[in-house]
Amino acid sequence: MLSPTGWGTAVGGAVLTAAGYALGYPEAAALGVACLLAVVSAVVWTLPRPGLTAERRITPRKVGRGESADGVVTLTNTGSRTRRGLRATDVCGDRPLGIDIPVLRPGEAHEARYALPTARRGVIPVGPLRLLRTDPFGLARRVRDYGSPDTLVVRPRVRLLPVLPSGKAHHIEGPTSDTADDGSLTFHALREYVLGDDLRRVHWRSTARTGTLMVRQMVDVSLPHTTVVLDTRAGAYVSEDDFELAVDSTASIAYAAAHSHFPVRLVSEAGPLLLADGSNPDAESLLDRLALVAQSDRGSMAAAFDELEHHRGGGSLVVVTGTGDTDGLAAIGRVRRRFERVTVLRVGDTPPTAPPPAGPGPDVPQLHISSLDALSAGWRGEAVR
């Protein structure tokens, strides 16, 4: 297709040619014919499809929001002619990314690396790679797609947090699945004896079979259950950045439990988001699921607590919301007695202007955070409370 310059040259050439012949000016006619020949030559120049192959890879394919991710494209000239005048554009979501391509001789390959935008969560399509070929005068251009589309997954940012202790027994450093205090009633595994172990827990049959002193390791049977309610209502947040911080906070809290193989339930007013029983490596699945969470247009979050009214009981309940509309938060009172501890997390740069939601009572702490750093500090204080 012709570029704007090419269209101008073609129109100008046609006018000059017609005027020159009509008015008897051979010089004008010759100039017009030259312009038309230049346009035709430009079209012929860009008509052949270049013998090129393109391969793209994304490193890494899954990143946290704001982390770096690169697209790497390798272009190889598989033809027999040197290729000049090539420009490439890759597309990440709806954002075009320009790529500089040098002169490619036959059989030569060029690797181009460029940064991909990761400011927003989501499963973002990348590609296809569009190759723009122009003639030396910029009169014509042809765009062709090369390679196949790919996908970049931008997940929430995560800070490592302790798991809120719950249950009948708590470790002084917080609950863990493999290092809970000895003295519990559940057998976990056999391990080699280390200095200081209780000799009453020596497993003599295994010791005789292996020739190594083996002891029983016991763990806490009351694993902490974590339930996180994420408020996805647009009216609950002053800005979109506040909502992104709420998702990051939810991911950090739930990831702490799932990463330690503890049960975690994640719900919103729109319905359940994820249920992990702790038996599988669910932490990565949780981040993938939260990469797709979007704001809703619901007016109240009371529906989020309907399912929790049938909760089996016990564990921690964390409600993550913004500093805006608090409609429906009073429903916490309906489920308050089913959990051993309840925490409300208010997210946003603007301090909450609404009064604390009615129902839970003064024993329910409310944390206001404006960054993940503030979450880390406040959450560690809540974990030892």
Image (spheres, grey):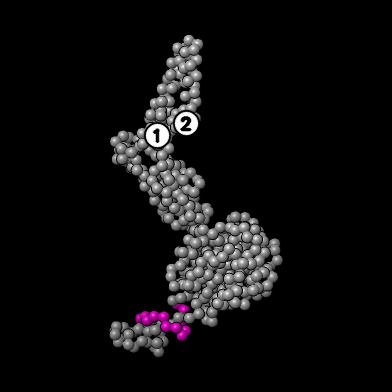
**Three-letter residue code for mark 1:** Gly
Q: Is residue 246 visible?
A: yes
Q: Is residue 374 visible?
A: no
Magenta stretch encompasses residue 309: no
Residue 381 position within the rendered picture, expressed as x and y whole percent measured from the top left: 58, 71
> Which residue is tagged 1?
85
Among the 4 quarters of the image, the one containing residue 188: bottom left
Among the 4 quarters of the image, the one containing residue 79: top left
Query: Where 138 falls versus 275 (above or below)?
Result: above
Residue visible at 58% across and 58% down in the picture:
295
Magenta stretch encompasses residue 191: yes
Q: Residue 10: which disc?
A: none
Query: Where 215 falls versus 276 (above or below)?
Result: below
Of the image marks 2 and 1, the number of the one nearer the N terminus: 2
Residue visible at 59% across and 61% down in the picture:
232
Which region is colored magenta? 179-192
Q: Is residue 203 left or right of residue 253?
A: left
Query: In the image shown, does 225 or 63 lie closer to the viewer?
Result: 225
